[in-house]
Image: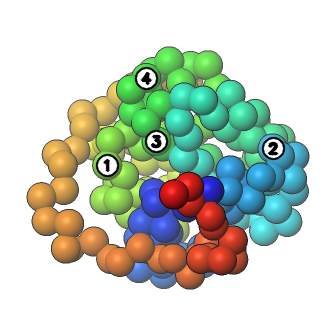
Amino acid sequence: TQPTFALVCLGAIAEQEGAHVRVIDAAAENLSVEACLREIASARPRLVGISSTTVGISASGKLAAGIKAALPDVLVIIGGCHVTALPEETLSEFAGFDMAVIGEGEETFREVIRSAEAGAGVPVGLPGTAIRKDGEVTVYPRRPFIRDLDELPLPAWHLLRGFPGAYHPSP
């Protein structure tokens, strides 16, 4: 199992912003949607970010719906390659996602965290996002690619449970 690189990169951004961060690498830990939901509900977060590929988008949508049912005030964000390719369709199909981060998510996620900390809810008009408001999906312009990757914090590998021993990449 390969660790999900996006999780440790975005976790590092969240830590840099002073957030208390918990990463659940559900695929690597072989967790069901229900087990993942139990962990999230017990943590009682204000914000949950989910990264998903196309293969996992239905399970991610089910998880988001469960989060909203258990914790209706939690801001649930979807990111990853599926929603980057199909932001409007993804938010239209899965009501549990409050917003999408499209493209490179580091700077966008930083601004979402700041908005959540300020109690502002779903940020409107933020580049690199798509939101659902009053039943309508709005996709905002994408951010440019990050030009200097050295500006980003180092990945927060310590956020992965059991890392590195629990991960066994294929040779």
Residue 22 in percent (x, y) is at 65, 71
What kind of element bears circle 4?
Answer: loop
Identify whether 54 is placed above or below 52.
above
Q: CA distance from mark 4 to mark 2?
A: 22 Å
The image's mark for residue 33 is 2
Dot 3 surroundings within 10 Å: few (below 14), some, or many (20 or more)? many
Residue 140 in percent (x, y) is at 30, 33
Dot 1 surroundings within 10 Å: few (below 14), some, or many (20 or more)? some
**Residue marked by disc 4:** 86
Answer with mark 3 or mark 2, whichever residue precedes in sequence: 2
Q: CA distance from mark 1 to mark 4?
A: 15 Å
What kind of element bears circle 1?
Answer: loop
Identify whether 151 is placed above or below 106.
below
- Quadrant assignment for the N terminus: bottom right
Q: Quadrant of residue 87?
A: top left
- Residue type beneath disc 2: Val
**Residue marked by disc 1:** 104
**Residue marked by disc 3:** 80
